[in-house]
Every structure is written in structure tokens, then in C-alpha cells.
Image (cartoon, helix red, strand yellow):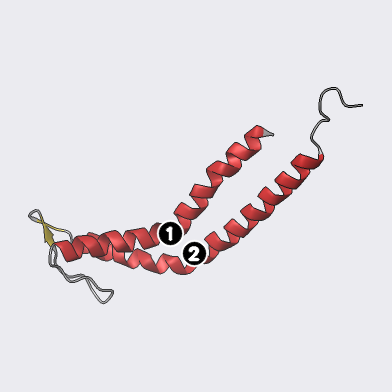
Amino acid sequence: MRLRWIVMAALLPVIIGIAVAPMISVMVAGSIAKANGCVLHEGFVNPCVVDGKDMGETLYAMGMMGWLMIATIPAGIIALIVWLIVATIMLVTGRRSAPPAAGAS
């Protein structure tokens, strides 16, 4: 019974992480571009020199990952709802099937 809760506890951060990963990618790309005075947008790749290396294509790719949020956020919400339903069922059935206390007749 305890193993099920460990698995459930491990699944929650995975679900949330997958759902928000594209958002994190966009925020990191935007922060790097802003810190280095670069322009970042979805139209095309702009040059962005960071420590002597052009990171424009990498930042552009990271920024475009934001479009994955169209899929990952709804999927994450659905997965979270399923997770809550399963956790509730496990909690209710776990209480119902608990062994009687010692000494009870």
C-alpha cells in the first residue's frame, strides 16, 4: 500500500514538470536574450552573441518551444485530474480495507 503512495507522489512532479517545461524554456530564452541585449521573437532568428558565441538559433528554438504549451498544458491538466481521481480512490479504498485495531472483536 505504501509503495502506491510513493509512486503517486513521484508522478505529481513529473506531470507538473512536463506540463510547464515549454513555459520554462521560453522564460529562460527570454531572460538570456534580455540580459545580453538581444531581440527574441517568433518571426525569424536574430543574432545574439553571448560570451563570443552566436546563440541566436538556440534561443530562437527555445522560444519556439512555447508553442508546445498548446498541447502540454491541457494534457497536464487532464493528467492532474486523473491523478486526483486515482489518489482519491486510493485514499477511500485504503481506509475501507484497513485491518481492525488490535484487541478489537
Q: Position of residue 7 (x, y in %)?
A: 59, 39
Residue 31, numbered circle: none
Residue at figure coordinates x 23%, y 62% from the top left: 31
Choose top left, top right, bottom left or bottom right for residue 65. bottom left
Query: Where's the C terminus, which quadrant?
Result: top right
> Quarter of the image holding residue 36?
bottom left
Q: From this viewpoint, which residue is outermost toward the top?
A: 103
Q: Tell me which residue sits at (49%, 48%) in the image.
A: 13
Query: Residue placed at 45% from the left, 52% from the top?
Result: 17
| Residue 39 appears left or right of 81 | left
- Quadrant of the frame with the N terminus: top right
The answer to which of 104 and 25 lies nearer the viewer is 104
User: Secondary structure under badge 1?
Assistant: helix
Whether label 2 touches label 1, CB < 8 Å:
yes
Q: Nearer the viewer, residue 40 or 4?
A: 4
Q: Which mark is residue 20?
A: 1
| Residue type (three-letter) at the residue carrying disc 1 | Val
**Circle nearer the N terminus (2, 1):** 1
Density class for disc 2 (Cα within 10 Å; few <14, some 14-19, many ≥20) is some
Give coordinates of residue 15: x percent, y percent: 52, 52
Q: Secondary structure at mark 2?
A: helix
Q: Amino acid at mark 2?
A: Ile
| Residue that badge 2 annotates | 73
93 displayed left or right of 36: right
Q: Quadrant of residue 26?
A: bottom left
Q: CA distance from mark 2 to mark 1?
A: 7 Å
Figure check: 12 above or below 72: above
